[in-house]
Amino acid sequence: MERIPILKMGRFLLVTIQVDLYDRLALTLEEDLVQMVYDTGASGVLIDISALSIVDSFMGRIIGNIAGMSSIMDAETVVVGMQPAVAITLIELGLPLAGVHTALNVERGMALLESRMSARPDDTSDADDD
Amino acid sequence: MERIPILKMGRFLLVTIQVDLYDRLALTLEEDLVQMVYDTGASGVLIDISALSIVDSFMGRIIGNIAGMSSIMDAETVVVGMQPAVAITLIELGLPLAGVHTALNVERGMALLESRMSARPDDTSDADDD
């Protein structure tokens, strides 16, 4: 496995993490994602982690990194599908994912992004949205 | 990795295959998918294989199986993101994926499903969906 696919869905990008991120794969994902936000002008990034039953501090940090990078590229990040055990671990590790929105599943994550987009004072991504 | 996540997006289901399907994982995916079509009343299934750089005859057969199962559950299947080398291999293996629609990426796949849904004479999925 060389890279994790990033799917463009309308104004958002969707990443499904199904495998443990080792160092190089994580870096490639970060690079690909930031580049894709730049190329597509996406206004939101959904990271689905429903396949992950455990996370470690590395994984938590990577998710935080991605959210931070997306944020300064003007795209919001929503982590979706977090399993209960993962939420417990993240808090116990002291990684509360500051600045990252979460939602129960992809549909709710998309609804969250949509509502945040429409609440923006200046929406440049969609001229006919008002 | 125990199972491949299936994401519900509106009326469609999205499966991103990122790892080689071994026997049990493939069977679990088939079961999960058919069950989820039943539970959600989804009218379309998108299978993203953009992460696969090679396929073998087993993989080709599984994709064909999933499409066949979805079809008799009244959901259409679109395989999206196929890499050129994969297309070459499938034909050379004699697996032309009969009955499976294909599209270049998820967005086009969704557009294809939308257009096919709207072309249906009797669309029952909308009645209880909103």
Image (spheres, coloured by chain):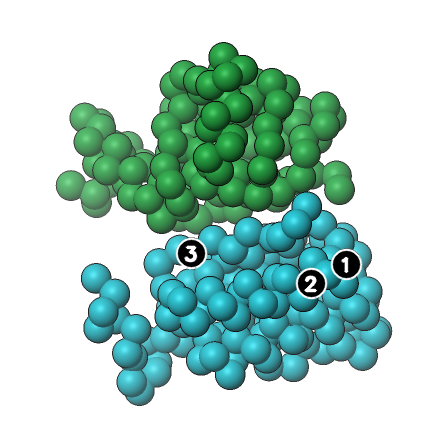
Chain colours: A green, B cyan
Which amino acid lies under the numbered mark 2 shown in the image of this protein? Ala
Check disc 2 and report the residue beneath it: B26
Above or below residue B76? Residue B6 is above
The structure residue drawn at horizontal position 70% and vertical position 70%, both measured from the top left corner, is B62
Q: Chain of mark 3?
A: B
Check disc 3 and report the residue beneath it: B8
Local packing at callout 2 (Cα closer than 10 Å; few below 14, some 14-19, many 20+) is: some
Circle 2/circle 1 CB separation < 8 Å: yes
Question: Residue B22's mark?
Answer: 1
The structure residue drawn at horizontal position 49% and vertical position 12%, both measured from the top left corner, is A94
The part of the image, by quadrant, that contains residue A113 is top left
Question: Residue A57's mark?
Answer: none
Residue A29 % position (x, y): 62, 31
Q: Label 2 to label 3, Cα distance in Å? A: 19 Å
Which amino acid lies under the numbered mark 1 shown in the image of this protein? Tyr
Local packing at callout 3 (Cα closer than 10 Å; few below 14, some 14-19, many 20+) is: some
- Is residue B103 visible from the viewing direction of this image? no
Circle 3/circle 1 CB separation < 8 Å: no
Instruction: Quarter of the image for the C terminus of chain B: give it.
Output: bottom left
Local packing at callout 1 (Cα closer than 10 Å; few below 14, some 14-19, many 20+) is: few
Residue A9 % position (x, y): 44, 48
